[in-house]
Image (tube, rainbow, N blue to C red):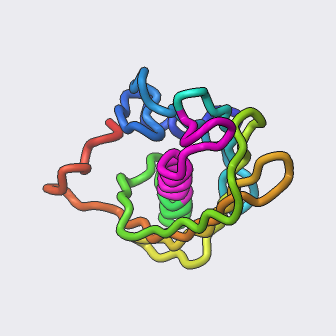
Amino acid sequence: MSEAVQDRYAPSSICFGCGPANEEGLRIKSFRDGEGLRMAFQSQAQHQAFPGVINGGIIGALLDCHGNWTAAIAIMDRLGLEQPLCTVTAQYEVKLRRPTPFGPALEVRSRVLVLEDDRAEIMLELKADGETCATGRGLFVAVREGHPAWHRWG
């Protein structure tokens, strides 16, 4: 698939990190890559914590949204669905291993560690210029009707 999963499955999403319809958001684009997803992100000046270094909250948002989409696609594939179930973050952690530089494109890759019918545990790595700047791990769960996120991608 050459189309980003966000554009294909949730074009009207307003999520700050991954919503294609949020003009002021990060608007990440995640693509299938083996058993996970990959993305590239070009930071902007307003994403800096101080000159030359990306804010940790921006890094967290990139990993959170990319991990959530990795889980949604993995659960969809496991269940043989044509559309992903809406998933939300139940838990995630980010380890900031070195300052993430402003300027070079950031690359994030994810892989599934544990997969069940309604949840997935995901491992993430963010690199800049080939150097690991941050890693993350998260648990993402599919929501049921009645949850506020039930139709958020529709």
Does the magenta portion include 67?
yes
Q: Which quadrant, please, contains the N terminus?
A: top right
Residue 125: image location, x then y, percent: 68, 61
Q: Observer-nearest residue: 12 or 91?
A: 91
Relative to 131, residue 114 above or below: below
Main SS of the magenta part reads helix
Please tell me which residue is depicted at 54% across the width and 45% down the height of the picture.
55
Q: How many marks?
A: 0
Image position of 140 (left or right of 114): left
Is residue 4 visible in the rendered image? The answer is yes
Q: Residue furthest top?
A: 23
Please tell me which residue is depicted at 51% across the width and 61% down the height of the picture.
71
Please tell me which residue is depicted at 61% across the width and 69% down the height of the picture.
123
Q: Quadrant of residue 143?
A: bottom left
Image position of 116 (left or right of 107): left
Residue range corresponding to the magenta coloring: 47-70
